[in-house]
Image (spheres, rainbow, N blue to C red):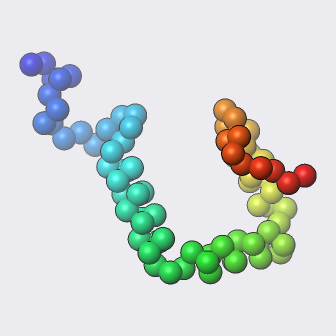
């Protein structure tokens, strides 16, 4: 077996589909969902959209949306 096929060697770069990062992200999301703070953070985000951060948040959203292939058709947009 050559080095490219050796799956037992630990590499700091897992490449595309980084399982370690995905697992850590999923665990953090689960902890947050179970923390009881979801509603509180949702209210904070809603207030931020109506506050002085509104313009900066809208610009950030526009920048992020420039990089998407397409929006989920299940998402409805208010205009």
- Please indicate whether residue 45 sits to the left or right of residue 16 in the image: right
Does any portion of residue 67 appear in the rendered image?
no
**Image coordinates for residue 13, horizontal then vertical, percent:** 32, 39
Total tally of numbered discs in the picture: 0
| Image location (x, y in percent) of residue 35 | 46, 78
Residue 69 rendering spot, x and y as whole percentages:
67, 32
Closer to us: 61 or 38? 38
Q: Is residue 33 visible?
A: yes
**Picture quadrant where residue 28 is located:** bottom left
Please report the residue visible at 42 percent of the width from the left and 57 percent of the height from the top. 25
Q: Residue furthest top?
A: 2
Q: Residue shown at 75%/72% (left/top)? A: 46
Left or right? Give the position of 29 relative to 75.
Answer: left
Picture quarter containing residue 56?
bottom right
Residue at 9% in and 19% down: 1
Residue furthest to the left: 1
Q: Nearer the viewer, residue 39 or 66?
A: 39
Where is 75 relative to 5, above or below? below
| Residue at far right of view | 79
Q: Quadrant of residue 9?
A: top left
Judging depth in this view, the residue of 79 and 48 nearest the camera is 79
For the point 83% across and 75% down, the residue is: 51
Horizontal relation, residue 34 to residue 11: left or right? right
Above or below, comparing residue 20 to residue 56 in the picture = above
């Amino acid at each position: 077996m050559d080095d490219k096929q050796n799956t037992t060697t630990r590499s700091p770069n897992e490449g595309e589909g980084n399982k370690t990062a995905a697992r850590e992200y999923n665990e953090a999301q689960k902890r947050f969902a179970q923390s009881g703070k979801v509603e509180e953070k949702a209210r904070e985000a809603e207030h931020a959209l109506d506050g002085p951060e509104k313009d900066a948040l809208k610009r950030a959203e526009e920048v992020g949306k420039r990089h998407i292939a397409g929006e989920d058709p299940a998402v409805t947009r208010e205009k």
